[in-house]
Image: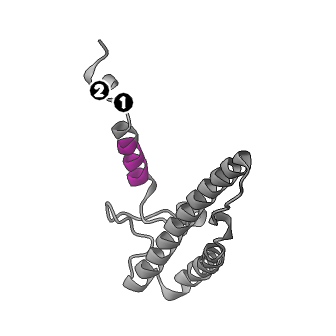
Amino acid sequence: MTPRELAPWRTTLDARRAELELLLRDRDAIAIDSSSDMLDQIQHATEGALAFSDLERKSALLREVRAAFRRIEAGTFGICVECDGKVTPKRLAALPWTASCINCRDAADRSQADSLVPMESQLGAD
């Protein structure tokens, strides 16, 4: 892609990076509450676990956004890291930080789903 073609992607990625960095600074939601009420403790633990999961998800997305910037600098933005094929503009519009084309992503998802199949179904049920 030319620098002119990359400019809108840089702007979009920069906005997303700034948003994620701001969201990740707020870690009050995972603070431990030492309430003496058991129900409050359970509720706070559940809320903390959900907040921690959300932070993990946002951190992973921020890593993907930063990796997209590295691909822009390397001149490989819009090129699938798996097959070296072109990532479609439609896919980039939906996920500007994506590193793979839809075919490679689908194959990875299928492979991951297959690895999650319970052992009994892989060996055959008795």
Whole-percent x and y of residue 92? 54, 66
Judged by depth in the image, the label closer to the viewer, 1 or 2, is 1
Say whether residue 5 is magenta: no
Pick the residue in front: 70 or 26.
Answer: 26
Pick the residue in front: 79 or 119.
Answer: 119
Q: Which residues are magenta?
A: 103-112
Marks 1 and 2, Cα distance to the nearest angstrom?
7 Å
Element under label 2? helix
Give the crowd class for mark 1: few <14, some 14-19, many >=20 residues within 10 Å: few
Q: For the C terminus, which image quadrant?
A: top left
Element under label 1? loop
Whole-percent x and y of residue 114? 36, 37
Give the crowd class for mark 2: few <14, some 14-19, many >=20 residues within 10 Å: few
Q: Main secondary structure of the magenta part?
A: helix
Pick the residue in front: 15 or 76.
Answer: 15
Q: Residue at x 46, y 79 (%)?
A: 1
Q: Residue at x 42, y 53 (%)?
A: 105
Residue 89 showing in the rendered view: no
Give the left or right position of residue 115, taking residue 48 as reference: left
Whole-percent x and y of residue 18? 63, 81
Residue 118 has which mark?
1
Q: Could you tell me if the residues under marks 1 and 2 are in contact, i.e. CB atoms within 8 Å? A: yes
**On screen, 11 above or below 99?**
below
Q: Residue at x 53, y 67 (%)?
A: 61
Q: Which residue is mark 2?
A: 122
Q: Residue at x 73, y 50 (%)?
A: 37
> Which amino acid type corresponds to the residue marked 1 in the rendered image?
Pro
Q: In the figure, residue 91 lies in which quadrant?
A: bottom right
Colour mode of the rendering: one colour
> Which amino acid type corresponds to the residue marked 2 in the rendered image?
Gln
